[in-house]
Image: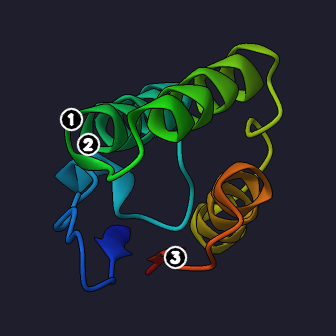
Amino acid sequence: MLVLRRIAPVLLLGTATLPAAAQTATLDQAARRAVVDSLARSLVDGYVFPAVAEKMAVDLRSRLARGEYDELGPDAFAMRLTRDLNEIAHDGHHQLRL
């Protein structure tokens, strides 16, 4: 199960869970898109810095569209999303994990 947690005194984004079909050893394009869309919406709706949230959302959706996540399994996908978020936000509080 892929879980998103944002732990900081100012904001808790909560938990985003993959659909049941995506909880297997591989992820299909629909599951990756669902995760990125859910994550992007959560950021835009609740991240403490709206402009940074928008940059992160656009970046994740662009990377998905370019196919940068296509060959990643669940663990690698979570680590890559974490890295991509922190490249923009630079706050180290974003972490996705299984």
Type of residue at label 1? Asp
| Disc 2 + disc 3, Cβ < 8 Å | no
Q: Looking at the image, is 7 positioned above or below residue 62?
A: below
* Residue 40 position by quadrant: top left
Mark closer to the observer (2, 1)? 1
Give the label on residue 42, or none.
2
* Residue wearing tag 1: 45
Name the spot of residue 4 as percent of width and height, x first: 35, 67
Q: Secondary structure at mark 2?
A: helix
Question: What's the amino acid at mark 3?
Answer: Gln
User: Does residue 58 appear left or right of residue 46 in this picture?
Assistant: right
Instruction: Report if the CB atoms under discs 2 and 1 are less than 8 Å apart.
Output: yes
Q: Residue at x 34, y 63 (%)?
A: 23
Q: CA distance from mark 1 to mark 3?
A: 18 Å
**Residue 81 to residue 52: above or below:** below
Of callouts 2 and 3, the N-terminal one: 2
Observer-nearest residue: 1 or 59? 59
Query: Does residue 52 appear to the left or right of 86 in the view shown?
Result: left
Q: How is the image coloured?
A: rainbow
Q: Residue at 75%, 64% (x, y): give it.
A: 83
